[in-house]
Image (cartoon, grey):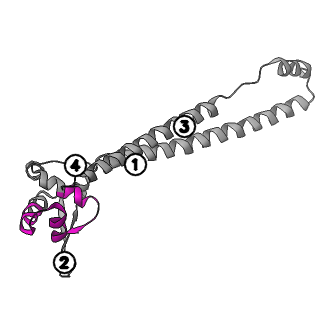
Amino acid sequence: MDIRLDKETFKALASSTRVDVLKLLGGRRYMQSEMAEILGFSVPTVKEHLSALEKAGLVERNDEGRKWKYYSLTKKGHGVLHPEELKIFIVLGLFCLSVVGGFYTSLSSQVGKVGTFAAEKAMLRAPAPATDMVQTLAGTAPSPVNYWPYVFGIAAIIFAFVLIYLLVKSYQYNRMLGKSLIKR
């Protein structure tokens, strides 16, 4: 998702309290009073910060017809808070696509070999004047070695390690965001 940061968004993100509110809403949706209690501010102060974030389009107020009004992140707010998630999903999708393509290529090359060998055997069995020459060439010619399944396997393992590394980094980043919210 392409996120456009305009003047209002930069104004909203200029305050560390608003950034803390965004980080808090990254986990789940909250009411004003819950956020005020967690962040250690008064409810009107939190309301001011939420209205600035709402004006920037980072937070939305969910009015479900009940007494309590919940606040949650918009797509823009989620993109500002977690920009790496999209990259991880792109890498994961490309990895899955390459695995499927590699298996398809590997299987199709194996099926092609079986068909080729069957055709060669049929030609060798057929009576022809040059049968002795074909048999001699078939017996002395080296059989082709297909290294592609091994190359594909090594590439799949490397991609898996890169994906695991990205997921671990994402997890550590999210834990770091959670630790910075504690103000005691």
Residue on which disc 2 sits: 68
Q: Which residue is mark 3?
A: 157
- Judging depth in this view, the residue of 158 and 7 nearest the camera is 158
Q: Is residue 34 above or below residue 161?
A: below
**The residue stretch that appears in magenta:** 21-50
Q: Alpha carbon of mark 4 to alpha carbon of mark 2: how far?
A: 30 Å
Mark in the foreground, 1 or 2:
2
Q: Earlier in the sequence, mark 1 or mark 3?
A: 1
- Judged from the image, the secondary structure of the residue bearing numbered disc 4 is loop
Looking at the image, residue 168 sits to the left or right of residue 66; the answer is right
Determine the secondary structure under disc 2. loop
Q: What residue appears at the point 12 percent right and 55 percent down from the top-left corner? A: 17
Residue identified by numbered label 4:
3
Q: Name the amino acid, label 4.
A: Ile
Which residue is most to the front? 184
Compute the Cα span from label 1 to label 4.
Answer: 17 Å
Q: Residues within 10 Å of mark 3 (few under 14, many from 20)?
A: few
Q: Which mark is residue 89?
A: 1
Q: Residue at x 40, y 48 (%)?
A: 89
Q: Secondary structure at mark 1?
A: helix
**Of the residues shown, which amino acid type is indicated by label 1?**
Phe
For marks 3 and 2, give the one nearer the viewer. Answer: 2
Query: What secondary structure is marked by label 3?
Result: helix
In the displayed structure image, the side of residue 16 where residue 182 appears, left or right: right
The question of residue 44 being in magenta is answered with yes
Cα–Cα span, label 1 and label 3: 18 Å
Give the mark, 4 or 2, whose residue is nearer the N terminus: 4
Closer to the eye: label 4 or 2 = 2
- The x, y position of residue 96, in whole percent, is 50, 46
- Mark 4 Cα-neighbour bin, 10 Å: few <14, some 14–19, many ≥20: few
Tell which circle, 1 or 2, labels the residue nearer the N-terminal end: 2
